[in-house]
Image (cartoon, rainbow, N blue to C red):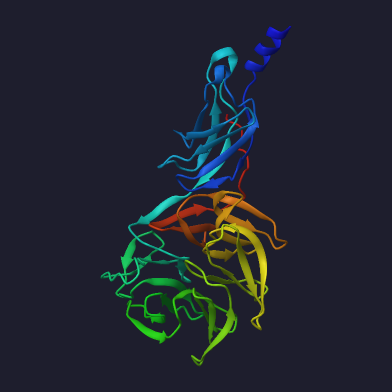
Amino acid sequence: MVLGRKSERASEQPVLHRLLPAASLPGGEVRIEGQGLKPPQARLPEVHIGGQLGAILMSASNAVIARVPEGALSGAVQVVLGSENGAGKSNSLHLDIAVPITENLHPVANPAIDAQGAIFATFSGSRGQTVPVSLFQVDTNYNVKPLGAAIVNPTGLAFDRGGTLYVSSRNDGSVYRVAPNGSAAVYAEGLGIATGLAFDHEENLYVGDRSGTIFKIDRSRNTFVFATLEPSVAAYHLAFGPDRYLYVTGPTTSSFDTVWRISPHGDVEPFFRGLGRPQGLAFDRNGDLYVVGSVRGRRGVVRITRDGQAELVISGYNLVGLAFARGPALILATNSGLFHLDWRTPGAPLPPEP
């Protein structure tokens, strides 16, 4: 009887229930949950991701954690145990995998997207580093065009309602207004270590100073101190929510950082606590907030719902920012380039094979 039960368990077909998360950059870690996922004789299973083998980081009978291989494309995830005792391939779940757009850049915050769908990103460099071109435009066919601007340490990017691009410099504490031909002129200065940028509904510009101040620049270019936060070791990232409050992140020396929420009158309150090194942030059409950071020890893009529930929805490392694009899609910025990710409801099983 005992031998029969062992044989029955060994012949169990692997069954996948869900992927956590169901989207990833190459190199990200995905948790595959199901049953019967561990082969007999203490061997490791194979995990096939988009037709390639993923490296296994953890293996148990009810879960496997695998790394998404470089070059893998969106597609089926399967767990394969082998052929002994009838064990074999699991069912398939779909994993969305981001595709590289361009590399050899150095973003440190969100990319910006204009009304035509072109993407703007930076080569920010180390403090004080001067490069011939520090601002780049990527058209809708993903052709990269260097712009003439040679801003030192460009950091935050934002478009006004008229389609003019503004760029902050953490080197000289200025914000530049960039013309379509790439030439840049100082729009405001004396803004400390200028980082994140965001426009409100009345076209006032907000600038994060990582030493602890959020500045407000009105349409007459008068500058005010809007709010004060604790200093950040990296940068303040800014985004306005549908409630017209300003949301702010900035990684500090803590591993349990806060997303701050600032009222139109400058009152500061915590919106969510518990992210590791939160950086770029953006809202979707449903009003949910997406933040680059880590939650419960897993890094990538975290979605925070309006009622404060947090979930890792995209796995990946070296992320610094993101922006929603047509498609629907997400443009993801790492510290060396840009990725495109088709954005649909994740985690749906694939249709049965014919």
Compared to 10, does 317 lie above or below?
A: below
The C terminus, quarter of image: top right
Residue 211 point in image, percent of width and height: 49, 75
Q: Indicate whether 347 appears above or below 249.
A: above
Asked whether residue 330 is in view, the answer is yes
Tell me residue 6's x, y (percent). 67, 13
Residue visible at 60% across and 43% down? Answer: 20
Which part of the image, by quadrant, shows the N terminus? top right
Image coords of residue 316 (percent x, y): 49, 49
Camera-nearest residue between 47 and 165:
47
Q: Residue 264 lies in what quarter of the image?
A: bottom right
Q: Position of residue 278 (x, y in %)?
A: 55, 61
Q: Is residue 110 left or right of residue 302?
A: left
Q: Farthest residue toward the left?
A: 132
- What count of labels does the image hold? 0
The quadrant where residue 284 appears: bottom right
Q: Is residue 63 above or below residue 159?
A: above
Q: Is residue 325 visible?
A: no
Classify residue 249 as left or right of residue 139.
right
Q: Nearer the viewer, residue 213 or 116?
A: 213
